[in-house]
Image (cartoon, rainbow, N blue to C red):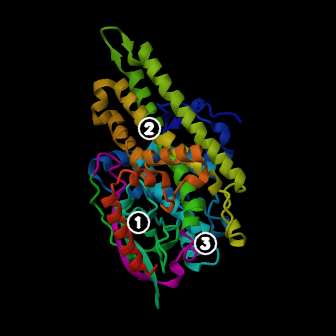
């Protein structure tokens, strides 16, 4: 496939890296045409708004409207709903492009929206409410979000300790306290997860629900952070009765939804967003290094060998992370016939995407780490002027830091990958159910006789309360 000779930015050549540094061989002609449309939308609307919203903290609704105009909001949903039925590769490209050429906050808004769309598409068949929402999403520019993280669980987002649901005559009584929910108070619909009705202590027993703004208490305008100023990540409170058909799937289907729908899209889009931020840093640093001259030497910043070394090292790291992500996207496409979501109607237990969980975690770790390192090194390359808002790099540096701590945080993700690699998949205790007997016996060995008697008494009292 021939590369485009020139990457355009409005009527001019793009100031950053050209197509020769993009892995265009992963993209179809349709993908490349869509990428050009996204770049044009970023030039005209999304990037200028990113600069303004970073200063004001305003929610970038016009950028959401642009994504709807490009039919990105329901892009993964099946064609039968009037949607693009896009591949994982296309999703990765779109996410990276929005973050790189446009706005990191908008890329995260898009990510949390499309992750929630995946949850809907996974169980859309036969649910008229979900099918209607998918059909209306792009025409009406309906932005959604996933509210999964409970306040007490930190970097582990999958323990809804303070949330619950129960069956009532009108449908479902849903209670949820969400910690960091993107688009809080601005979303047109919310996907949330709680423990299932009749929950008995097994945190793998989860259920997923669809809610609308009048059923959710969001927190518009309260987001006050180091970066990502426009995504309005804030708490939500849900205490609502919703109709029967607003359960997504069925009671107890939440863990499978996580494994097969939520996580695969989230990890892939994490990679796209933070690889895109790293590339944005490389782009603006290139512009600065080529324009800025030291008069005393008559040399541009780009002419110094140290600049070339720093830039080359950062670019090599970025390309490695990008190729990992695109390789994962291609593998997901191969496993799902190009990103199909209709298979679950006939095969509800199918799980082709879940097979790539460890690879998704690695993609997230690589991209978030990349963005943190490259943003720092490109700030240093830009020197003192890099601290000014006009240079743009300082905004990207602040935005880049969020990826490391977004759940599952890099520390949590790395620990899961390491445990999985050392001891096997069954050793990963997703739902906090496995007893670490080595640690238990080690701690018991530290206790004297009186401490052991006290422990026996406490355990006996607990058994008596449960009737065991």
Decide if residue 224 is in sight here.
Answer: yes
Specify the segment rendered in magenta.
225-254
Seen in the picture, residue 271 relative to 144 is either above or below; the reply is above
Judging by the rendered image, the residue that carries numbered circle 2 is: 371
Element type where label 2 sits in the image:
helix
- Relative horizontal placement of residue 361, taking residue 1 as reference (left or right): left
- Relative horizontal placement of residue 148, taking residue 77 as reference (left or right): left
* N-term mark: 3 or 1: 3
Tell me which residue sits at (54%, 81%) in the image.
245
Give percent across and percent down for residue 387. 28, 32
Judging by the rendered image, the residue that carries numbered circle 3 is: 124
- Relative horizontal placement of residue 408, taking residue 260 as reference (left or right): left
Mark 3 touches mark 1? (CB < 8 Å): no
Seen in the picture, residue 441 relative to 116 is either above or below; the reply is above
Distance Cα–Cα, label 2 vs label 1: 27 Å
Seen in the picture, residue 448 relative to 138 is either above or below; the reply is above
* N-term mark: 2 or 1: 1
- Relative horizontal placement of residue 40, taking residue 445 as reference (left or right): right
Mark closer to the observer (3, 1): 3
* Label disc, if present, on residue 187 of the rendered structure: 1
Distance Cα–Cα, label 3 vs label 1: 20 Å
Give the crowd class for mark 1: few <14, some 14-19, many >=20 residues within 10 Å.
Answer: many
Give the crowd class for mark 2: few <14, some 14-19, many >=20 residues within 10 Å.
Answer: many
Tell me which residue sits at (40%, 57%) in the image.
62
Question: Which of the image's four quarters has the N terminus?
Answer: top right
**Please, which residue is most extreme toward the bottom here?**
169
Mark 2 touches mark 1? (CB < 8 Å): no
Residue nearest the viewer, comparing 16 with 275: 275
Tell me which residue sits at (57%, 71%) in the image.
253
* Label disc, if present, on residue 359 of the rendered structure: none
């Amino acid at each position: 496939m021939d590369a485009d000779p020139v990457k355009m930015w409005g009527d001019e050549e793009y100031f950053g890296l050209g197509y020769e540094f993009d892995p265009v061989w992963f993209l179809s002609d349709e993908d490349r045409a869509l990428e050009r449309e996204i770049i044009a939308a970023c030039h005209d609307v999304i990037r200028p708004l990113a600069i303004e919203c970073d200063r004001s903290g305003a929610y970038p609704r016009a950028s959401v409207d642009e994504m709807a105009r490009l039919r990105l909001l329901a892009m993964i949903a099946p064609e039968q709903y009037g949607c693009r039925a896009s591949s994982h590769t296309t999703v990765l490209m779109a996410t990276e492009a929005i973050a790189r050429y446009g706005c990191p906050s908008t890329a995260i808004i898009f990510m949390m929206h499309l992750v929630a769309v995946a949850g809907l598409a996974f169980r859309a068949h036969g649910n008229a409410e979900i099918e209607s929402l998918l059909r209306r999403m792009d025409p009406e520019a309906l932005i959604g979000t996933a509210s999964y993280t409970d306040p007490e669980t930190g970097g582990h987002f999958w323990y809804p300790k303070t949330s619950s649901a129960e069956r009532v005559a009108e449908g479902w009584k849903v209670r949820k306290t969400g910690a960091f929910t993107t688009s809080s108070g601005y979303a047109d619909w919310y996907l949330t997860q709680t423990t299932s009705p009749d929950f008995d202590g097994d945190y793998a027993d989860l259920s997923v629900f669809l809610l609308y703004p009048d059923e959710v208490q969001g927190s518009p305008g309260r987001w006050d952070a180091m970066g990502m100023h426009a995504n309005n990540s804030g708490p939500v409170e849900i205490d609502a009765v919703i109709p029967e058909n607003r359960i997504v799937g069925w009671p107890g289907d939440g863990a499978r939804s996580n494994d097969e729908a939520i996580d695969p899209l989230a990890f892939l889009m994490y990679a796209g967003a933070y690889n895109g931020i790293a590339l944005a840093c490389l782009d603006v640093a290139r512009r600065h290094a080529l324009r800025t001259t030291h008069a005393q030497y008559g040399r541009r910043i780009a002419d110094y060998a140290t600049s070339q070394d720093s830039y080359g090292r950062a670019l090599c790291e970025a390309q490695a992370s990008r190729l990992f992500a695109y390789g994962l996207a291609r593998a997901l496409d191969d496993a799902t016939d190009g990103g199909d979501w209709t298979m679950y109607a006939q095969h509800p237990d199918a799980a082709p995407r879940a097979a790539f969980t460890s690879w998704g975690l690695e993609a997230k770790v690589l991209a978030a780490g990349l963005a943190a390192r490259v943003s720092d090194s490109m700030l240093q390359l830009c020197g003192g002027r890099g601290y000014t808002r006009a240079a743009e790099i300082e905004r990207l540096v602040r935005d880049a830091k969020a990826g490391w701590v977004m759940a599952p945080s890099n520390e949590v993700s790395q620990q899961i990958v390491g445990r999985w690699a050392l001891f096997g998949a069954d050793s990963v205790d997703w739902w906090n159910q496995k007893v670490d007997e080595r640690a238990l016996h080690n701690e018991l060995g530290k206790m004297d006789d009186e401490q052991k008697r006290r422990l026996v008494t406490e355990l006996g009292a607990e058994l008596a309360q449960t009737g065991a």
